[in-house]
Image (cartoon, rainbow, N blue to C red):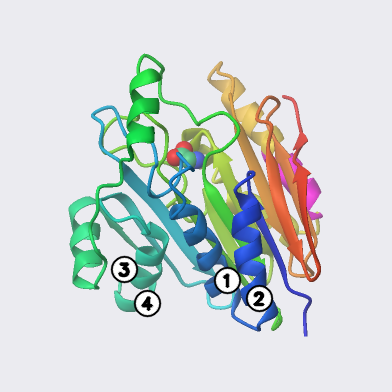
Amino acid sequence: MATPVCIATWPFGRLAAMTASKLLLAGKPALEAALAGAQAVEDDPSVNSVGYGGLPDRDGVVSLDACVMDGRTLSFGAVAALERIGNPAAVAKLVMEKTPHVCLAGRGALEFAITNGFKTRNLLTPKSLEEWEKSKPKPPQPMPGHDTVTVLCLDSKGDLGGVCSTSGLAHKLPGRVGDSPIVGAGLYVDNQGGCAGATGVGEEIWRILGSHKVVEMMRAGKSPQEACEQAVRLMHQVAGRRGVHVSSAAFLALDPQGRHGAAAVPGTNFEFAVGRPGSLQMLKGVEVGG
Ligand code: GLY
């Protein structure tokens, strides 16, 4: 028997970790708990970077990216550029369970969701429309102080599961896909190495396949904290090769023993929640400069 643990990104990670921890304590599988945690954030209209109420793209359309991964079987599913469905992570789980594929995008993802009983809705709230209008001249970038919800869980059987869900960068080009639905970039989960997730500028996270790197470093013996810090250093190095600076990015990780770690690019102000039996803490990711 393992002691269940859940970690989740940003201040809204508290809601995700609380929701997931209840299920883990009731003996539910890691992936089911992580999905419920992410879904609680997707459903919260006050969160403007995930699910319902997420900020729209350049043309005012909300499109969502998500993926799920099971650490026992390495099964995963993803959806990208999904419109009008507020729970993309649940659709991603069905892609994993019901199709021979691992990722559906755009119109096909929407059709698949509708066929499987998901109801369409307008994902734009009056508040998110107003915020989008106000921030219009800005280039696409993560919202300060929050972005993707990534939920990583270890269940009582010792299995790992993870979920990642986002509306991506506000004002992104229509059709832009970030790191969040890309397994290896925004999320990676393997019972034998650990699990990791990312948040921040998706293009930079994807470029280094950051979450997979973190898991492989844990597999090779690094602690979750060391592995996250090393991934941030690598991101700085790779961005430096193009003469650019990463404005905001963070990794968080959980190893098969339930130890956690998190590291971020300076200025990200990354916070995450850690739920263990009887405790829920908010912690700050260690900032690692280039
Ligand atoms: N990390 C979220 C995104 O870039 O879409």
Marks 2/1: CA–CA distance? 6 Å
Disc 3 marks which residue? 101
Looking at this view, is 32 or 241 the one in front? 32
Mark nearer the N terminus (4 vs 1): 1
Disc 2 marks which residue? 24
**Is residue 127 rendered to the left or right of residue 214?**
left
Which residue is at a point 45% across and 53% down the rendered structure image?
42
Disc 4 marks which residue? 97
Amino acid residing under circle 4: Glu
**Is residue 251 rendered to the left or right of residue 207?**
right
Marks 2/4: CA–CA distance? 21 Å
Is 225 colored magenta in this rendering? yes
Residue 243: image quadrant is top right
Q: Mark 3 packing: few (<14 Cα in 10 Å), some, or many (20+)?
A: few
Q: Quadrant of the C terminus?
A: top right
Q: Nearer the viewer, mark 2 or mark 3?
A: 2
Mark nearer the N terminus (2 vs 4): 2
Percent across and percent down for residue 116 are 24, 73
Q: Mark 4 packing: few (<14 Cα in 10 Å), some, or many (20+)?
A: some
**Helix, strand, or loop for circle 2?**
helix
**Helix, strand, or loop for circle 4?**
helix
State if disc 1 and disc 2 touch (CB < 8 Å).
Answer: yes
Residue 258: image quadrant is bottom right
Magenta region: 223-231
Which residue is at a point 29% across and 56% down the rendered structure image?
85
